[in-house]
Amino acid sequence: MQKRRQNLLKFCNKIDCDSIVAFEPENLYYMTGFWGEAIGILDKNGTTIVSPELEMGRAKEESTDCKIVKSERGKGSLSTLIGLLKGKKVCTDNNNYDVIQTLKKSISGIKSTTVPFYRAREVKDTGEISILKKASSILDKMYELCVDEIKIGQSESELQTILMSYAMEKEAFATGYKSTLNPLIISGGPNSALPHAQVTKRKFASGDMIVVDLTLRYKGYVSDATRTFGLGTVSSEAKKVYEIVKESQEAGLTAIKPKASCKSVDDVCRKIISKKGYGKYFIHSTGHGIGLEVHELPCLSPLSKTNLEKNMAITVEPGIYLPNKFGVRIEDSIIVSNKADVMHKFTKDLIII
């Protein structure tokens, strides 16, 4: 925890601030070890949690080396916060206009920016890597369950129920990602051509390609993987597309090493798919950082300016999506080491069920 706080203050100081304030639960957790409804304050003198009374018990129990200050909820917490920050040069992850304007009345030097938080969280420590690897092993078991459970006539939503029941037994839970109504992406047949398809009651049929994207949180940290299965009699085109995506993903993994540019990894994956004539059907970036959120820094995209560093946690997930026909995506979560430390062991060979 001390190392994390040092990193936060380092990036805070780089933008000419001396105090950093966390409103978002992910950032609060990273700073304090407590995930809840509270505000975290960090400066050179230590760490304080501003907490409503209903959260104080957990805050005291779960946080590490923090002073706990009681406040009212809502606007009352801002009054308490202002009293603790007078005379400070503050950066905060809060971007709510009304909140920032209220704070500015008393704290002239406040800056609204997530940069110090995301930069500090970009490189994982040994504890974070251990949790991510355990999370990834749970996803691997869920893919084994897919092989056993997927069948013709089963609906996407029925498979999601089976998988989430298993996940929760293993203490892996939905991420609460705001852009979807479902904990998982399970899409068969034409639905699989939508990279972020919503789970439906559509029933699997022979010939379907079935994309199963598992993104789950374990002990706060998110692992993210995708496998695409075939069902029944699969077309030669679907098999061909699958092998192209597999080749692309393998090339991306091979390109990963410290100091390699994120753009170069994306380029390698995209080049293979383009050479095979499917470039316009690869419609998203090759990967992203993972950690306390589904999407963190860095981004592996054609526009990225970032170089990889040892112990970054990222995904590599090229895909091809043929509208109204099918899609294929293969994704692993990876720790950047001297090469890609792939956290998922489940096969990437095409499994036809």
Image: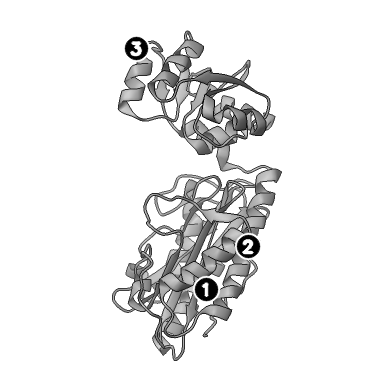
Residue type indicated by callout 3: Lys
Q: Which residue shows up at 41% across the image and 29% down it?
A: 94
Q: Secondary structure at mark 3?
A: loop
Q: Which residue is mark 3?
A: 105
First reached walking from the N terminus: tag 1 or tag 3:
3
Alpha carbons under labels 1 and 3: distance apart:
56 Å
Q: Secondary structure at mark 1?
A: helix
Q: Position of residue 83 (x, y in %)?
A: 47, 11
Position of 130 with respect to 106 (left or right) is right
Vertical position of residue 114 compared to residue 314: above or below: above
Alpha carbons under labels 2 and 3: distance apart:
48 Å
First reached walking from the N terminus: tag 2 or tag 1:
2
Q: Which residue shows up at 43% across the image and 79% down it?
A: 209
- Classify the position of the N terminus by image quarter: top right
Vertical position of residue 193 compared to residue 297: above or below: below
Q: Secondary structure at mark 2?
A: helix
Residue type indicated by callout 2: Ile
Disc nearest the viewer among 1 and 3: 3
Q: Which residue is mark 2?
A: 138
